[in-house]
Amino acid sequence: MVKKQTIIIVNIGRKCRTGKGCRHVVKRILKAIKSWLKIKRGKINYYERIFAGIIFSVDADNLIKSPGLIMNFLAHAYLSFDNDEVLVGNMISDFVKGKTQYDFPENIQKGIRLHRMIDAFTDEHPVTKEAKAFFKPAVGLYAGAFMDVVYDHFLANDSGIFSEVSLQLFAAKTYQTLSVHKTVLPVKFTRVLPYMIEHNWLFNYRTPLGIQQSFGGIVHRAAYLQSSKKVFLTFEKHYIPLQKSYSNFFPLLKEFTAHQLQGLIRL
């Protein structure tokens, strides 16, 4: 039986095409990859060095399958205002790069643009900037990414918007809408979607475990973060002021998004 392989291509720069410095760089990359992939056993196989990159192969059986790639999807789903194609675009926007957005149907393109408007408004708002200050000592420039997840947590627990039952129903409807549009989803998103559904990410923003997993997902993708423990402790310590930030900010975001969506639909 042939084992499945995961191929990883790492760009290590022009300086490492030749010379003794490459060996040290390769060792550091191997260590980082093993940590990132959480390999349980076995070794990464050095396969080939080409140009400015290194290719590694990893036995797929050695990877720990984890729902730790949770991102901040709930607010984007909710702020699609029950428009299915806008929802699809809003959810896949982070997986769509550059001019490829124009490959999608028109209303999905509007969802992609709406997502980016939401992100820009959120990042630049004074309430968000003030709240991010809690996280900056622990995670620096990644404070905004963690704050996005925090907003989703409080949205999931906002009794004025969701009960436990209605959030479950909303999550199920969102998964169904995405599944119906599976043929137009980006390849990377189609790999994420089964985990999203299986582990019910949208609902689990309600729970401390869901937030821990979301934070862990950010750490896995971050360039220089090693652990989510400190940032989660920060979340717990400042829970009340962070909740107040959500209460002050989210109604403004909802109003802004509704206005922007109206403008997009009229185009």
Image (tube, rainbow, N blue to C red):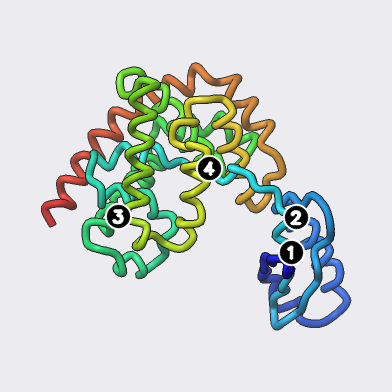
User: For residue 163, what is the image quadrant?
Assistant: top left
- Compare residues 33 and 179 and report the one nearer the observer: 179
Query: Circle 3: is it few (<14), some (14-19), or many (20+) Cα within 10 Å?
Result: many
User: Which disc, if any, is residue 58?
Assistant: 1
> What residue is drawn where x is 59% and y is 28%?
209
- Disc 3: which residue: 113
Q: Secondary structure at mark 3?
A: helix
Q: CA distance from mark 2 to mark 1?
A: 7 Å
- What amino acid is labelled 1 in the image? Val
- What amino acid is labelled 4 in the image? Ile
Q: Secondary structure at mark 2?
A: helix
- Disc 2: which residue: 62
Query: Circle 1: is it few (<14), some (14-19), or many (20+) Cα within 10 Å?
Result: many
Q: How far across and down, in percent of the image, does residue 106 sit?
A: 22, 61
**Farthest left residue in view:** 266
- Image position of 70 with respect to 212: above or below: below
- Disc 4: which residue: 70
User: Given contact means CB atoms under 8 Å apart, are the residues at marks 1 and 3 in contact?
Assistant: no
Question: Is residue 139 in view from this perspective?
Answer: yes
The disc, 4 or 3, on the residue closer to the chain's N-terminal end is 4
User: Given contact means CB atoms under 8 Å apart, are the residues at marks 2 and 1 in contact?
Assistant: yes
